[in-house]
Image (cartoon, helix red, strand yellow):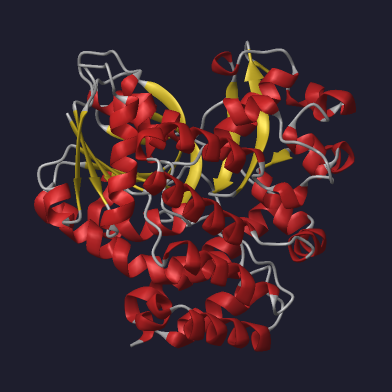
Amino acid sequence: MRLTILGGGGFRVPLVYGALLGDRHERRVDELVLHDVDAGRLGVIERVLRQMAAGRPDAPTVTATTSLDEALEGTDFVFSAIRVGGLEGRTCDERVALDLGVLGQETTGPGGLAYGLRTLPVALDIASRVARLAPDAWFINFTNPAGMITQAMQTVLGDRVMGICDSPLGLGRRAAHALGLPGDATRFGYSGLNHCGWLQTLVHDGRDVLPSLLAQPELLLSTEEGRLFGPEWLQAIGAIPNEYLYYYYFTREAVAGIRGSAETRGEYLLRSQADFYRAVGDSPEQAHELWVRTRRERDETYMAEAREEGEERDATDVAGGGYEGVALALMAAIARNERASMLLNVRNGTALPGLPADAVVEVPCIVDSSGPQPLSAVPLTGHPLGLVQQVKAVESLTIRAAQEGSESLALQAFALHPLVDSVVTARLLLTGYRERIPALDAVFR
């Protein structure tokens, strides 16, 4: 079985390869193809993977190429984690917004819209190539903003493209662990959009135990979300939000925290990644060791702006793995017809009331050889429903803006986002992004 990774020179690719190395099933990935537009970066990651596979004759073969068509032709699965504009573009996503006093974050708020605008044309071109070169392939999207990109690609590939994220699964597991329950023996009543969803039920032995967790502040404080949002707020809304909802519920604090830091997350990652590639160039025989060390530092500083000074990230979250496990489980369910329950970004249909049928939502699904089938999700009501409806409307405007090259639609998307409170500010955001990010400006030419 052949797996193609787009963005194959990306720093997190070894996580996927590590998961593949641990897969002992007969029907497994035996060929991995890496694609990236940066040949130097691609070579470094290929070296890391080869060192990981040392002494493992059963390891999947690794091929690296800068030819997109060569990478896609005849593949069985495509895993996409591309970053159009690179980390330099991400730093602009953050700084243009922060300079205007608006949240500067990679996927949430105006930064996410800027990221989406320049990524959508590339993603749609990739979808067209997959349809031509590998029409039977399943496409697993991790490229952010995951919901928006997946929804656009579905206009070409239909339900053969789905989005994944490790945040909902991590949230559900942490909630179950706080109650002393095994995560695989509970059902997570999670619903919403990517990076904008809520855990509303936690069912164990046929009983919803989430109210029990919400009633115990000391248990809530043992979770990342309890410390992030505070037990009082979680009790008030009667649910546990995805960690990215911190940027909506505590917008002013988030902006102040980011602006008060010496560097944004993007600037930190840009520096960290440059140091890593430079170090591998100096000591290629230590490529894997250098990657492990750099990865640990990156994970430990994730969402640092939302934690108290001196507070460290939960060690179990750092060690617990992430999207690579979700990706492997998804591929296994489809390729081996191993029926599995998963939280995925898929076409809504009738799963989540209040949103259009073609909207991509993040809900529980059953996955087998026919692909993912969304289950009826716990309905959203009140402010969560209003928020996802507004965010989804903005995402749809952004998709249309990229497809039509429409500056007017892009301006509407920025102006109507809940984290942008002014049409004037929206114009300044769009102008600033166009001036600093050539790939975004090209969308309107």
Kindly tell me whether residue 437 is visible in this rendering: yes
Give left or right: position of 117 versus 5. right
Give left or right: position of 91 versus 242. left
Which is more toward the observer, 325 or 132?
Answer: 325
Kindly tell me whether residue 343 is visible in this rendering: no
* Whole-percent x, y for residue 210 in the image: 74, 25
* Whole-percent x, y for residue 241 in the image: 69, 42
202 versus 393 height, above or below:
above
390 versus 214 height, above or below:
below
Residue drawn at x 69%, y 51% is 245
Give left or right: position of 418 versus 360. right
Which is more toward the observer, 152 or 273?
Answer: 273
27 versus 229 height, above or below:
above
Q: Quadrant of residue 336?
A: top left
Residue at the far front in the pictured view? 282
* Whole-percent x, y for residue 292 in the image: 49, 33
Give left or right: position of 10 versus 104. left
Residue drawn at x 26%, y 13% is 25
Query: Is the N terminus in the top left, top right, bottom left or bottom right quadrant?
Result: top left
Residue drawn at x 50%, y 36% is 376
262 versus 272 height, above or below:
below
Q: How many marks?
A: 0
Which is more toward the observer, 172 or 21?
Answer: 21
Q: Quadrant of residue 148?
A: bottom left
Which is more toward the observer, 134 or 276?
Answer: 276
* Whole-percent x, y for residue 182 in the image: 61, 13
Residue drawn at x 45%, y 52% is 146
Q: Quadrant of residue 231?
A: top right
Query: Is the C terminus in the top left, top right, bottom left or bottom right quadrant?
Result: bottom left
